[in-house]
Amino acid sequence: MTILLAPAHARALALTAPVVAAIRPEQLALPTPCVDWTLRRLLEHVIGQQYGFAAAARGQGADLAVWADRPVATGQAGTLAALAAFADSARELTEAFAAAEAAAATLQLPEILAGHAFPAGQAIGFHLLDTLVHAWDLAAAVGLPLEVPADLAGLLLGIAEQVPADSHARRPGRAFAPVVPAPEGADAFERALRLLGRDPRWQPAG
């Protein structure tokens, strides 16, 4: 039986939305678990990737311009604009992923592998991983809890287990840091975070 990932991905976006909505303008300069990225930089990346994957699902992914980060301005107006851009890009992406998966389309993802067409389900899995991990990054940066349902955590763990963990793949500048060993009894979400180089105990310095 084929498992459709678009509905699960939509739920992951819905988990992220209240975290983004809670961000205040004075928090944009805060550090995040993404090394050297402030909260503003992470938001710019998240929104840009959502628009990029939506474009890819519509057959436009080969154009590197669609993957550009979306600038987040300072102040209350900038924060509100970022929230609106997050909601707009999430809506576009949800619709585009559902259509692409239903049509068994393929997506061009040049930031992952230029010139290669990824099946829609695999591409959705890539962004499901990004969505849940960055939701945790955002929540950790502003001190909010993130409750991930067990079925979504299980999906995330299955995808995370397929991400290469060798020293070449995890060297500085790559998307994920080296694996952080998990303690006995860690749940699926914690194990996935650690496989992707995140330390669930992370806190802002100071």
Image (cartoon, rainbow, N blue to C red):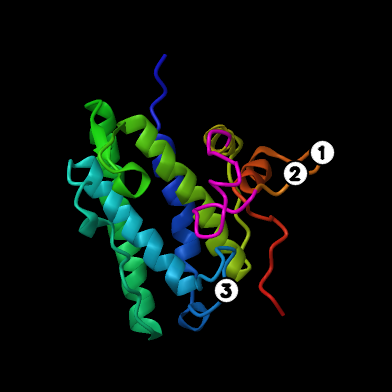
Position of residue 120 relative to residue 85, above or below, is above
Task: Give the labeled residue for mark 1.
Answer: 184
Observer-nearest residue: 112 or 29?
112
Residue 101's spot in the image, x, y percent?
29, 30
Inspect the image, locate mark 3, and give the three-letter code of the amino acid beneath it. Answer: Pro
Query: Which residue is rendered at x = 49% and y = 69% of the image?
Result: 22
Disc 3 is placed on an element classified as: loop
Q: Earlier in the sequence, mark 1 or mark 3?
A: 3
Establish if 184 lies above or below 197: above
Quarter of the image holding residue 36?
Answer: bottom right
Q: CA distance from mark 1 to mark 2?
A: 7 Å
Element class at badge 1 = loop
Q: Position of residue 194 (x, y in %)?
A: 66, 47
Q: Residue at x 34, y 50 (%)?
A: 111
Q: Amino acid at mark 2?
A: Ala
| Residue range highlighted in magenta | 161-178
What secondary structure is marked by label 2?
Answer: loop
**Mark 1 and mark 3 residues within 8 Å of each other at the beta carbon:** no
Residue assigned mark 2: 182
Magenta span includes 168? yes
Using the image, determine if residue 94 lies above or below residue 122: below
Identity of the amino acid at label 1? Glu
Is residue 8 found inside the magenta-colored segment of the image? Answer: no
Magenta part mainly helix, strand or loop? loop
Of the numbered discs in the image, which one, if any, rests on residue 38? none
Left or right: where 136 falls relative to 63? right
Tags 1 and 2 touching, CB below 8 Å: no
Q: Residue 31's mark?
A: 3
